[in-house]
Image (tube, helix red, strand yellow):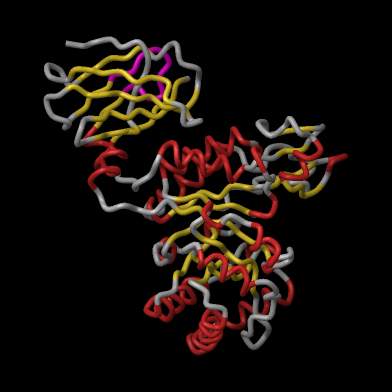
Amino acid sequence: MRKPLTIVVFFFISFLHYHLFAQKTEFRVIGYVPNWIEVSAFANGFDFSRVTHINYAFQNPDANGNLIESNTGLTTLVNKAHENNVKVLVSLGGGSAAGGTTLTNYQNLITTSEKRAAFIHKIALYLKQFSLDGIDVDEEGPAINSNYGPFIKQLTDSLRPKGYLITAAVGWGGGSIPNATLRLFDFISLMSYDYTGYWDPSNPGQHSPYWYAQSMINEYIGRGVDKNSIALGVPFYGYGFYNETGYQAYKDIISRFPNAYTIDKVSDTVYYNGTNTIRKKTTLALTKVAGIMIWELSLDMAGEKSLLKVINETIDSIGFNGIDDQEITSELRLYPNPTSDYLDIEVVSVGNVYVSVEIVDIAGRVVINQPIDLSYDRSVRMDVSVLENGLYICRCLTVDHAVSGIFIKK
């Protein structure tokens, strides 16, 4: 017996079963802080409750393996972060380290087991000196060669027993990282931006489109990385082409175009991610992986137009407790998905009870809250034709059980 309801639902639902019954998995909010800004001033003015991890970028070695980049303000940053239970990692590499003397130094330091051990020892001394919580490996492009895997293996073998985190940012050149090496990291952050840029004037457009985020998530999950060990990277900057050429901070774009914070393009050809896209990507991260990464925090706009504020509000409105495919498929079945007219929902194991259904849009607003009776039939057909196109979350709740999921209205 099928019972039509007037609105929508679906499968962001076994994510809530996990929320109630599984061990809590932290949803990470990872923000980069570059060492070329006034780090102490940033640390003294930043609300650290808005993030879980800070990556201090970047450090790179001289020919002898000493980390020689600026440490100005790092002690202040670490102290402020630790006061708020936020972990701080140092990030090794960066795109600019994929060439020149830095690349030569790095590659020479990891050619043999003995050289790698000596380099890792100096990294460990640096971590201890500044009371850091780990290292983020952000080697890119040609820096990822046949010695990368053995280096990461020795790095994890040496530092993890000391309690340090070992993470990575992956993007340019990530296809050269062995799958087995990816699984050694505590977690990885996907650099799902810089798809194009001002360096390629023949290809103007969005450098961090939503589909690119989806594609990178699917790629790395397909390579065997645990979903709970992935964070989705988002940019707090944009690129301009032609008359507006170059790298532009989100705060500078919105200062020039105050009403453009919800969209992704201004002027002739300036492309970035506005609040709507950041909200949509945060929802994607909450439902597909286990974190979001930001390059970089100082580029954000203060106040109501802040992208970090949108990230935090989306996390608070949806909630997170881990990704578990088995729970999703066994607790709730939803089809067709995507859908345009109706959605069939089969709730497998909530018992013979009445269920409260909540439908939530990507802004975190509950657009429907309605009871359904599953005592006689576990299947319900819902009319979703009235919904606007987009991504929706459905929660099916009883007093002591919940299942949840996501569907797309097209």
Q: Is residue 162 above or below residue 334?
A: below
**Rendering coords of residue 97 (x, y %):** 68, 69
Closer-to-camera residue (344/130)? 130
The magenta-colored residue range is 335-344
Residue sitting at the far right: 243
Quarter of the figure with residue 263: top right
At a point 39% along the width and 54% down the height, the residue shown is 26
**Rendering coords of residue 147 (x, y %):** 52, 75
At a point 52% along the width and 77% down the height, the residue shown is 131
Closer-to-camera residue (148/352)? 352
Q: Is residue 408 magenta?
A: no
Q: Is residue 342 magenta?
A: yes
For the stretch drawn in magenta, what is the main secondary structure? loop
Q: How many marks?
A: 0
**Rendering coords of residue 309 (x, y %):** 58, 43
Closer-to-camera residue (365/291)? 365
At a point 27% along the width and 44% down the height, the residue shown is 18
**Rendering coords of residue 296 (x, y %):** 64, 54
| Residue 224 seen anywhere in this rendered image of the structure | no
At a point 74% along the width and 48% down the height, the residue shown is 249
Q: Is residue 235 left or right of residue 83?
A: right
Q: Is residue 406 above or below residue 316?
A: above
Q: Quadrant of the N terminus?
A: top left
| Residue 245 seen anywhere in this rendered image of the structure | yes
Quarter of the figure with residue 326: top left
